[in-house]
Amino acid sequence: ILDDPDLKDIDPTVLKHCHAAAATCILEAGKQKADISAISACLEDCKLDKERIDQFCTEYQHRELVTVVSSSIGRSPLHITDVSWRLEYQIKNSQLHKTYQPSYLVTLNVENSDSGSHRDVSFSCTMEQLQDLVGKLKDAAKSLERATQM
Amino acid sequence: KLNIGVDTIQHGVEGLVYLLTESSKLMISEVDFQDSIHVLGFSDELNKSLLQLYLDNRKEIRSILGELAPRLPSYHSLEWRLDVQLASRSLRQQIKPAVTMKLHLNQNEDQTAQVLQTDPATLLHLIQQLEQALGEMKMNHCRRIVRNMK
C-alpha cells in the first residue's frame, strides 16, 4: 500500500492506521460470521456514507480466503497428511538366518500445525496387525458417515 | 563335585553355548550338525546327547535370537475418536470434523503412545492406500517369492 502511486499524498502513518483498521474490521466480522446487514448497520453507526458502506460490503463478500486462513489457525495434535508403505520379506539378519518373514513398513507423514515441520511416524507390522489397523480406520470412517447422516 | 578347574568348566560352557547358538542361528539340519561335531572326536553317546540337546532347544534359542535383531517400532494397537471443532479463537461457528487417534507402538519393550489427528478426506485416502498394501501379499509376485524362498 505504501508504494501505491494513488496514495502517495497521504501521510504514511494515517495510511497504516486505515489499513490496520480495515483489516481488523474484516477479521472480526469474519470471525463472528457477520452478514452484510449486520455490517452495514455497524458502519452506519460509525457515520460512513452509503457509497463507502456498499464498497466495503462488496469487498467483504470476497472473504473466502480469509475464512479459510482463519479456520486453519489454531492448535491441534500432529496432523496426518499422507501414508507410504513398503512390503518386505526378511531372509536373514545378523542374529538369525532363515527367518522367512514378510512384514510391512508403514510411514505416516505428519505435519505440525504450529511449525509446519514434518515429523514422520514409522513402524513395522505383520499382515495381521495391518489388517487390524485398517479395520479400525474403517470403523472410524463408518462412524463419520453415520454422523454426517444425523 | 566334578573335580575339574573353574577355567575348564567355563570354557566348556562357553563352547556349548557357541555350538548351540550358531547351530540354531543357521538352522542346520541334523545331518550337518552330526557331521560338524564328528570332527571333535567325542564318543557316539556324547554326540547323540549333543544332537538331542540341539533339537530340543533350537526353537527357543531362535526366538530369543529373534529378539536381538535390529527392529523398528512395531504396531501394537490404535484407538480412535471422532471430534468436531465448533469454534476457535480465530473463527466462530465452525463445523470441522476430525478423527483423533492414539497409536500405540512397541519399541524394545517400551510402549509409546502418540496422539495424531486427521481429516475425513485423508482418512479415506489412508484406508485406500493401506488396503492396496494388504492386497500386495495376495498378488502372484509375492506368492511366488514366498513359495520359492522357503
Image: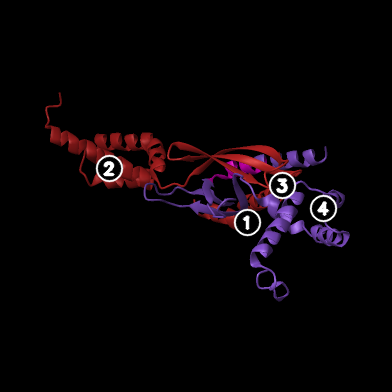
Chain colours: A purple, B red
Which residue is situated farthest in the top direction here?
B1
Near-viewer residue (B68 or B43): B68
Which residues, given as a range, are shown in magenta? Answer: A125-135
A132 versus A48 height, above or below:
above
Query: Is disc 4 placed on a helix, strand or loop?
Result: helix
Near-viewer residue (B135 or B5): B135
Q: Disc 4: which chain? A: A
**Most frequent secondary structure within the magenta stretch:** helix
Quarter of the image for residue A116 reads bottom right
Q: Nearer the viewer, mark 4 or mark 1?
A: 4
Task: Identify residue for label 2.
Answer: B18
Quarter of the image for residue B108 reads top left
Name the amino acid type tagged 3: Leu
Name the amino acid type tagged 4: Leu
Name the amino acid type tagged 2: Tyr
Q: Nearer the viewer, mark 3 or mark 2?
A: 3
Residue A67 appears in view:
no
Q: Disc 2: which chain? A: B
Is the Cβ of the residue at disc 4 closer than 8 Å to that at disc 1?
Answer: no
- Residue under disc 2 on the same chain as residue under disc 4: no
Residue B140: numbered disc: 1
Magenta span contains residue B26: no
Near-viewer residue (B28 or A33): A33
Task: Identify residue for label 4.
Answer: A43
Residue B91: numbered disc: 3
